[in-house]
Amino acid sequence: MKDKAGNVVSKDTQNWLAKHPEIDAITVALCDINGVLRGKRIPLSQLGKLLDGGIRMPQSICTVDIWGRDIEVSELVFESGDADGVCTVTERGLIERSDGVATSAMFQVTLNLEDGTPLTTDPRHALENVVKRLDAKGLTAVVATELEFYLTEMIDGVAHAPILPNAQLPTTKGNVLSVAELDIVSAFLDDVYAACRIQDIPADSAISEAGAGQFEINLLHSADPLKAADDALLFKNIVRQMARKHGFCATFMAKPFGDQAGSGMHVHFSMLDKDGNNVFDDGTELGSDTLRFAVAGLLGAMQESTLIFAPHQNSYRRMRPNSHAPTNAAWGYENRTCAIRIPGGPNAARRIEHRVAGADANPYLVLAVILGAALIGIDAQVAPSAPISGSAYDVGAPSLPMDWLSAITEFEQGKTMIDVLGPQLVKLFSQAKQQEIQHFLSIVPDVEYHAYLETV
């Protein structure tokens, strides 16, 4: 089948549209460096044009700041004439979206140059490049993510702990692994799982977490890191959409409440060889030398990669001692105080858990940096420092950057990030963060007036 312009429309897309005659427009979206979907709505008559590479967006759209503003010093804006890139539909194809009432369609895209070369500042392409490097070594990464979030209530533009269904007062404290709390929000969770099934997102177990109104949902492992990152991105949008439907505001901020637990995005991964064998498994609980080489690569890149794992001002409120969020480059077996944890379980499933990223981080860049740094360690074949027993907060392991500006400096000065992400993406990501930090520095918060106005 072809549309009026002569462009081919796939049979799967034809069949789905035939079942949904109410659809008259589709969303075209790509992921920017902050993990925000940006794009346009096009009439259904333009679908064939999209699938044939005829829809375009500015190359600079991948590297705007958190408010969607151009980076003022970006080489992709005025310096180069703010040229367009060509939208290329990802292998996921049509994404059906439904809130239980209305159904819509979305195509996720990446940006290429006119000659088909992938745009180096597109986060999905950054991960794709790392996947190709793994493939060239005969390795396949198997990845799973765990995403924590809060359900909140917005009052006068400020987030507060929610009043959960059938409760008289706001939730004031965490209720870890509470079955009763899961039951209370079961209607919300049912809608999240239903939407995940529609979008082919492998949502697994849900738990109530340590914060007031905080929950975690795990996504099952995938041998396709690009799909795993897609799943995490789309999952976050589903949670926000379903929260609104149920009268909440869901947030993946790293630390929405100063006196409550932070929200992380823990990444579990292993690697398979060409025969499907887990190269982290050597038949023992300690795992293979390859596992330890990967750990060394992750630890070696930890300081300069922190900005990817903690990309926002709020991110650094989460990274505090004795908070279950890592503060230094340490690793250990079954040790949740470490940045890198080796979970127990069957030897055949031996894997690494990377615990640094906040839930606010871009899943494509997080996976690219984790897998890229691990591969560098595997290639170097250097053993890591000794694993930590007991609290990692009490040892002298190298500290992570504990504030935003320090993390930007480490990111700019490091060599591993340039190797993994490429110099242009590193440069523009840093420029975006510098622009964001300057905006925050220009705002005097109320707490400073309360502390200083008439006292100094």
Image (cartoon, rainbow, N blue to C red):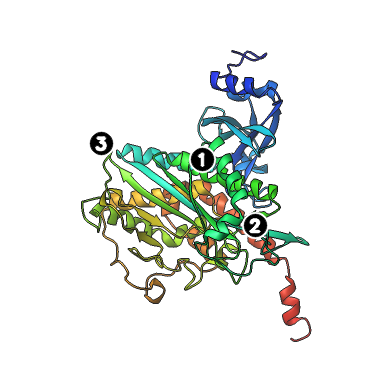
Three-letter residue code for mark 2: Gln
- Taking the spot 63% from the left edge, 13% from the top edge, the residue there is 6
Above or below, 23 relative to 177? above
Task: Pick whichever, 455 or 393, lies toward us.
Answer: 393
Label 3 or label 2, whichever lies nearer to me, is 3
Please state if 181 lies on the left or on the right of 334 as rendered: right
User: Residue 376's x, y, as percent?
Assistant: 34, 50
Proximity of marks 3 and 2: CB atoms separated by less than 8 Å: no
State the residue position of label 1: 201
Q: Position of residue 18 (x, y in %)?
A: 63, 19
The residue nearer to you, when weighing 175 against 279, is 175
Q: What's the mark number on residue 435?
A: 2
**Mark 1 or mark 3, earlier in chain:** 1
Q: Quadrant of residue 196?
A: top right
Q: Say which amino acid is labelled 3.
A: Asp
- Viewer-side residue, 10 vs 126: 10
Disc number placed over residue 275 in the picture, else none: 3
Whether residue 176 sits left or right of residue 24 in the image: it is left
Q: Residues within 10 Å of mark 1 (few under 14, many from 20)?
A: many
Q: Earlier in the sequence, mark 2 or mark 1?
A: 1
Check disc 2: other Cα within 10 Å, few if <14, some if 14-19, many if 20+. Answer: some
- Contact (Cβ within 8 Å) of mark 1 with mark 3: no
Q: Secondary structure at mark 2?
A: helix
The mark that comes first in sequence, 3 or 2, is 3
Q: Which residue: 36% across, 60% down? A: 341
Q: Give the number of the disc on residue 355.
A: none
Could you say where residue 413 lies in the image, as x and y percent from the top left?
47, 59
Q: Is residue 69 visible?
A: no
Q: CA distance from mark 3 to mark 2?
A: 47 Å
